[in-house]
Image (cartoon, helix red, strand yellow):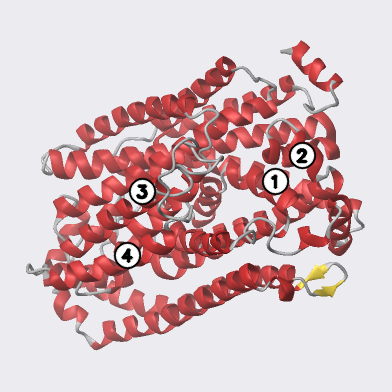
Amino acid sequence: MTTSLILAQAAGATSVGNPWVNIAIFAGFVGVTLVIVLRASKNNKTAADYYAGGRSFTGTQNGTAIAGDYLSAASFLGIVGAIAINGYDGFLYSIGFLVAWLVALLLVAELLRNTGKFTMADVLSFRLRQKPVRIAAAISTLAVCLFYLLAQMAGAGALVSLLLGIDEKLGQSLVIVVVGALMILYVLVGGMKGTTWVQIIKACLLIAGTAVMTVWTLALFGFNFSELLGAAANVAGTDAVLNPGLQYGASSASKFDFISLALALVLGTAGLPHVLMRFYTVPTAKEARKSVVWAIWLIGAFYLFTLVLGYGAGALIGPERIKAAPGGVNSAAPLLAYELGGTLLLGLISAVAFATILAVVAGLTITAAASFAHDVYASVLAKGKTTPAQEMKVARRTVIVIGILSIAGGIGAQGQNVAFLVALAFAVAASANLPTILYSLFWKKFTTQGAVWSMIGGLGSAILLIVFSPVFSGRETSMIPTADFALFPLANPGIVSIPLAFFLGWLGSVLDKRTEDVSKSAEMEVRSLTGVGAEKAVDH
Amino acid sequence: MSSNPQHEVEAEVDFIAEQNSEEFKELRKTHRSFVFPMAIFFLLWYFAYVIMADYFHDFMSIKVWGNINMGILLGLLQFVSTFAITAAYVRFSNNKLDPKAKKIRERLEKKGA
């Protein structure tokens, strides 16, 4: 590995830094978080402890954890790279990710905290028939988690080649196995409490690291943002990087595709099951509100940093060098870190990127496991006749199964273009989850049939449209470039699947011959707004 | 839900009567009168921005100050409006929603116990 590194450096410094420094800093992060996870695990006695961290986190802690859960490696490396190369259009992407939090703040977080216990399905099935709604909600939860997990694990392989200089497939697979095994360990032992602490620490490191780089970059341009923009345009050789259109403005299809993506981003966030589950880790709705407020500040600040870092990388490194480096677009942030602070800052930023993957996959895994054990196993398979101990046993086994699946998927997806998976996860969350959440919180006449039609229709249409889109076939960049069955012209299904799911939810309800329990509906509405009988924090 | 001892108390509460009470209707009206218009406003403003960035490149490329153009300015305004709506909602809930919700909650919990 050292020889390959020296060779690479000799070949024009495409690979920079010292992989051992990166590994050492990451190992330090793993060591610290492991100790915390082990300490947190001592209080994991009940299901509320395991799934919801005993509901004892404060709004500030939970908000930081939400930021840690939400800001994936893709949004850090991907957005900085996108701004560095495509300029303004990369920035456009991050705005959708931030504005989306207003949906969660205004319409979802507090009402959900007041009515549910552990999973999204708790809220959706509150006043509807348990079995069909829980199964549909669990299917869409598992689908979103799986798409997101695969994207993260495949990204881990790419990150390895970029940051550790391991280019062989075997070495990359080994790192995916290590990341997967660590993730299983964290979730198995630490439960939601351990996972939350990993996310809090990671969020602090990520935001502190990017803040330092932002101030540093701005200082090089005399704290004049306009000058930084000018330098980036100079290096790129065109003013076009400052204007919209470089990435999405190519054709009328790509413009329309962006509208579709924007819709999925802004409506998807409040339907992401791993984000929803975080609202149960605080004692009251008021703390849930504080969580979202704190998350909005942190996430907003982070995306402002990426704007500076993206143009900073464009100005100080230049799009040509970034594209030529191993890892391509994703190498913009690490290259900028090396340019600014040398080996040590690069090591820190690399370790943060790894920690990011670890924290995000841990959050997804516990969500998927909770949904399977609580919604499918306890409520449907065992028909409610199970003990919390038995349910937690199932949850822990599910963690192992999901961990192994995501390791296998991550290794299998290496080298494949799986970037569409994150966009697909948002599209499914926006079409299968959000309509049903909003209907059940705000529309009295919503019925079981409406919920099932909306969820299955939203999930099915989003996946079908992706399969028949240019993502899968018909282009050189498709997964199957040799075939062409791309009947749907857009890479993002949201613009069709989201309205369709809202429509199906309405249609299924008005056509439903069965009526729902009026007193349950009244109880849900009173509880959602007042917090009567909401799950309390666990005392230890 | 009834397997949790914390919920046993609610068996005593007549939620349908509570839902129809003037006090609860007032709370619901207050809540919806803020969150619905605000949600519609920020969604319209966000999509107006997306459509401008997507279809009106010339307008977005107008330089306003130095190298900062309309696009960057409106993009940063999206951040500002998001932060402002967040702050406004917190103020509104602390002053208008929480006291009303608390009153009903405490009355119902007393009734149930």
For marks 2 and 3, the one nearer the N-term is 2
Side (left or right) of A293 relative to A456: right
For marks 3 and 4, the one nearer the N-term is 3
What residue is disc 2 on? A322
Residue A111 or A475: which is nearer the viewer?
A: A475
Could you tell me how far apart the alpha carbons at marks 2 and 4 are, in whole angstroms?
41 Å
Q: Check disc 4 and give the amino acid type.
A: Leu
Residue contact between numbered discs 3 and 1, judged by CB atoms under 8 Å? no
Label number found at residue A458: none
**Are tags 3 and 1 found on a single chain?**
yes
x, y (%) of residue A474? 48, 44
Name which quarter of the figure residue A123 lies in: bottom left
What residue is disc 4 on? A500
Which residue is painted at 38% across and 84% down in the image? B30
Could you tell me how far apart the alpha carbons at marks 2 and 3 are, in whole angstroms?
33 Å
Label number found at residue A463: 3
Q: Check disc 2 and give the amino acid type.
A: Ile
Judged from the image, the secondary structure of the residue bearing numbered disc 2 is helix
| Chain for disc number 1 | A
